[in-house]
Image (cartoon, rainbow, N blue to C red):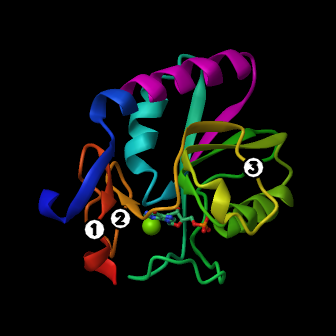
Amino acid sequence: MKHDIERVLLTEGQLQERVGQMGEEISRDYAGKNLLLVSVLKGSVVLMADLMRAISVRCKIDFLAVSSYGSSTRTSGNVKLLKDLDHPVDGMDILLVEDILDSGLTLHYIREMLDTRGAASIKICTLLDKPERRKADIHADYVGFTVPDAFVVGYGLDYAEHYRNLPYIGILKKEIYE
Ligand code: IMP
Ligand code: MG
């Protein structure tokens, strides 16, 4: 697997440290609120598992899934809901947990959809942000790292469903997907 990686962008240590800081920040901001962490499957599961343990205030968790890229590295713009939340969200302070904010089309779709359901608030936490590639009018409230426009894998992020189990984030060699 590691032969397919051009170079390591973020080490395990850097990820742990930053996720810890994000957890502290979120804990401060959500004290006394009805925090509901919503993990967008599947890319955010690794972040979700680490982040929720770095959060010290009461919270609930839920999961939703939307259609992904398939094996391409660019979003189609056609987002489809594959798995909805298990519980109603009225009165909850939703924090969407995503692996990466790229074109922004996925999170834009999700936020619009949840907006109609009476949540008290909706904010976005993303491990990675690629602002250069933004198409939708959306920004994250909590950003782990701003990254350059390269295709990255690991720590939950995939290419064609592989590499999610790498403990670090690496830039995938172009020859793998071109
Ligand atoms: P967006 O709708 O273009 O913002 O795409 C968001 C989704 O695309 C993320 O949740 C990822 O699943 C996927 N994605 C975007 N960029 C990358 C990348 O560099 N590596 C792996 N997945 C990516
Ligand atoms: Mg993906």
Coordinates of residue 36 in the picture (x, y in percent)? 64, 38
The answer as to whether callout 1 falls within 8 Å of ligand 1 is: no
Coordinates of residue 75 in the picture (x, y in percent)? 57, 77
The residue lying at 23 percent from left, 59 percent from top is 5
Q: Which residue is mark 1?
A: 173
> What amino acid type should be assigned to the residue bearing mark 2?
Asp
Coordinates of residue 28 in the picture (x, y in percent)? 67, 15
CA distance for labels 2 and 3: 22 Å
Q: Quadrant of the C terminus?
A: bottom left
The residue lying at 65 percent from left, 67 percent from top is 103
Disc 2: CA contacts within 10 A as few (<14), some (14-19) or many (>=20): many
- Residue 118 lies left or right of residue 1; in this view the side is right
Q: Is there a contact, CB below 8 Å, between mark 2 and mark 3?
A: no
The residue lying at 59 percent from left, 55 percent from top is 130
Closer to the eye: label 2 or 1: 1
Magenta span main SS: helix
SS label for mark 1: loop
The magenta region covers 16-38
Badge 1 or badge 3: first in the primary sequence: 3
Badge 2 or badge 1: first in the primary sequence: 2
Q: Which residue is mark 2?
A: 158
The answer as to whether callout 2 falls within 8 Å of ligand 2 is: yes
Disc 1: CA contacts within 10 A as few (<14), some (14-19) or many (>=20): some
Badge 2 or badge 3: first in the primary sequence: 3
Q: Which residue is mark 3?
A: 139
CA distance for labels 1 and 3: 28 Å
The residue lying at 86 percent from left, 61 percent from top is 116
SS label for mark 2: loop
Coordinates of residue 94 in the picture (x, y in percent)? 71, 42
Does residue 175 show up magenta in the picture? no
